[in-house]
Image: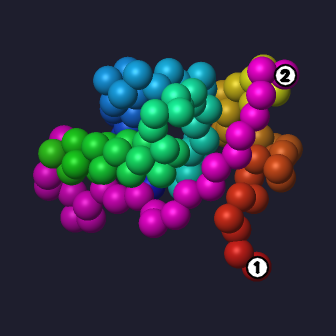
Amino acid sequence: MLIGDMETKVFGLIREKSVEMETPLVAIGGITDHIHIAVSIPPRLSVSEWVRTIKGFTAFEMNKLYPNRSDRFQWQGGYGVLTFGEKQVAFVTDYIHNQKHHHAEKTLYTGLEEVGTED
């Protein structure tokens, strides 16, 4: 769960690693139980490699930052991926930046929220 200053730290770590990987973040946002990221991943890198690297790096660093937590920081096993083009960048970016509002107001765009959900 991303609570308190953990969200800021996790987002910072994701930004840091993305710069190192030369995969520019377009947007990042989320709520306590999930995040959305718009990122430009070059063809030399697979999406699964990017996700694995980001998840591994952030979990490792967060557990170093919070060594006395009763539960270790970890990501869920799966993830969802959507692709979008230049015409959708503004919509997707706005949606990601306003995650908390969309969830609070129940104004969710199901096309961006229900990837990989099970009935």
As drawn, the label of residue 87 is 2
What segment carries the magenta color? Answer: 65-87
What kind of residue is marked 1? Asp
Q: Position of residue 74 (x, y in %)?
A: 34, 59
In the current view of this chain or complex, which residue is farthest to the front? 44
At x 70%, y 68%, the residue is 117
As drawn, the label of residue 6 is none
Q: Position of residue 43 (x, y in %)?
A: 53, 33
- Quadrant assignment, res 26: top right
- Whether residue 58 is in magenta: the answer is no
Up/down of 10 relative to 23, above or below:
below
Count of numbered marks = 2
- Callout 1–callout 2 Cβ contact below 8 Å: no
SS label for mark 2: helix
Q: In terms of sequence position, does the residue under pointer 1 or pointer 2 come before the other?
A: 2
- State the residue position of label 1: 119
Q: Position of residue 108 (x, y in %)?
A: 82, 47
SS label for mark 1: loop
Residue 56 visible, this angle: yes
Closest to the observer, 2 or 96: 96
Quarter of the figure with the N terminus:
bottom left
- Quadrant assignment, res 29: top right
Left or right: where does residue 23 sit relative to residue 85? left
At x 84%, y 22%, the residue is 87
Quarter of the figure with the C terminus:
bottom right
Q: Position of residue 50 (x, y in %)?
A: 43, 42
- The CA span between labels 1 and 2 is 31 Å
Residue 28 visible, this angle: no
> How many other residues sit within 10 Å of disc 1, few (<14), some (14-19) or many (≥20)?
few
